[in-house]
Image (cartoon, rainbow, N blue to C red):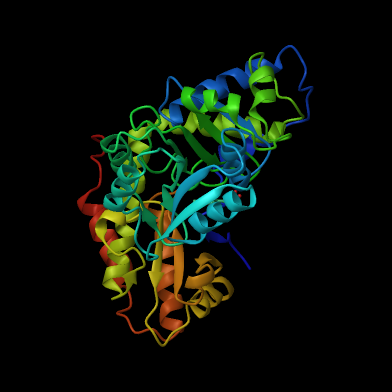
Amino acid sequence: MAGRNHLYVPGPTNIPDSILSAMHLPSEDHRSPNFPLLVKPILENLKKIFQTEKGQCFIFPATGTAGWEIAISNTLSPGDKVLAYRFGQFSHLWIDLAKRLGLDVEHVEVPWGQGVPLDLLEARLKADTSHDIKAILICHNETATGVTSDLPGVRKAIDAAGHPALYYVDGVSSIASIDFRMDEWGVDICIAGSQKGFMLPAGLALLCFSQKALAARESAQCRRAFLDIGDHIFHNAGGYFPNTPSIPLLYGLRKALELLLEEGLENVFARHARLGEGVRRAVAAWGLKLCAQAPKWYSNAVSAVVVPEDFDARDVIHIAYHRYNLSLGAGLTELSGKVFRIGHLGDLNELSLSSAIVGTELALLDAGIPLTPGSGIAAAGAYWRETAPAIPAR
Ligand SMILES: *Cc1c(COP(=O)(O)O)cnc(C)c1O
């Protein structure tokens, strides 16, 4: 098909040309005396993205899924009780992985379309007077449903209960798109991946550990080898890795961090909020509903859109891809056929995202879903014009 594919799945996201160029390099010696000049600033800048001064960052040649395992295996022991909420495919998969690692997972079913129930969390922690719960697993942005949970609220609930549990966050689809503050919110481990907010190919699991999480490693009995952060602590100190790093991904990450910090994290979050709201205005103008059940859950990184009952969301995705070269995210497991997802995170602006809105609108019409042609892009455009930043004088 002529022209570019319009990639609006919620990861992998679009890669800026400057990152693509930065990754196009000959191989080099990862044990050379110059290599730490690449690695050390990356590890320092990564801390700024997690908004931490006290934490320590790790880069594994892996994906977000491995990040879940790195968090658990380095800090917990088989049989340890952890508390988790299941409200989408990603929170589900983390729970499944924790069970496979031998943890005693207390998982609470929450309707898909809602986030962490803070009142239940606080009550459960208050009831756990013997402090059996060792860690709480929270999916910040549930990519399957387009739901963002209230992380400061989770910290408040833990503190209100005076509970010592470790606080782990899956930030794979939120970090570098939605505000996240490691130190301020008292998070103990945060997990990210390279292919979402970082605008890179998949292949890096990026983590941040608090000092409390690092200390928990001393007594953690889960078996770990390749995923042991101990080897990274030793080698990172000198600016190296315990095994061969993906050098192009490191150069890409260096560039991504440069782009994010140059724009400024606050501006990055504000851009995602404004662009995401434009998509939500379009969805409302089409007369469709989001999977997220209330505005407090709305995700600025991804919108899961529910199709009317007699329609199949897979048809919309199929038409969008084959007729308009537009890739939309599918509904996962329980949501298959019921929703399609528009990813609006990473490298995007009003006009690039407009292609997703227009293409979606055409595919919805072609699938027979009644709506007013042009209504979505008109609503998004009106919102973006109302909220447009000032332009410099001519
Ligand atoms: C994408 C995603 C993952 C899985 O990451 P992989 O890189 O595919 O292993 C985990 N959690 C969330 C919230 C995600 O969006």
Q: From the viewer's perspective, tell me whether residue 131 is left or right of residue 44.
A: left
Count of all numbered marks drawn on residues in the image: 0
Q: Residue at position x 25%, y 42% from top?
A: 389
* Position of residue 24 in the picture relative to residue 282 (left or right): right
The N terminus lies in quadrant: bottom right
Q: Residue furthest front?
A: 130
Left or right of 279: which side holds 167? right
Q: Residue 167 falls in which quadrant of the image?
A: top left
**Residue 162 in view:** yes
Image x and y of residue 196, in percent:
52, 47
Residue displayed at 28% across by 42% down: 153
Q: For the C terminus, which image quadrant?
A: top left
The vertical placement of 346 against 282, above or below, is above
Identify whether 272 is placed above or below 332. above
Going by the image, does 31 lie left or right of 372?
right
Give whichever of 259, 46 is nearer the camera. Answer: 46
Residue 9 visible: no
Residue 340 placed where, x, y %?
A: 46, 69
Residue at (44%, 84%) from the top-left corner? 311
* 352 shown above or below 291: above
Q: Depth check: 201 or 90 in front? A: 90
Residue 120 on image: x %, y %: 30, 53
Q: Quadrant of residue 113?
A: bottom left
Between residue 212 and residue 363, name the one nearer to us.
212
Q: Position of residue 346 (x, y in %)?
A: 47, 46
Say which residue appears at 26% left-offset and 37% top-offset.
Answer: 160
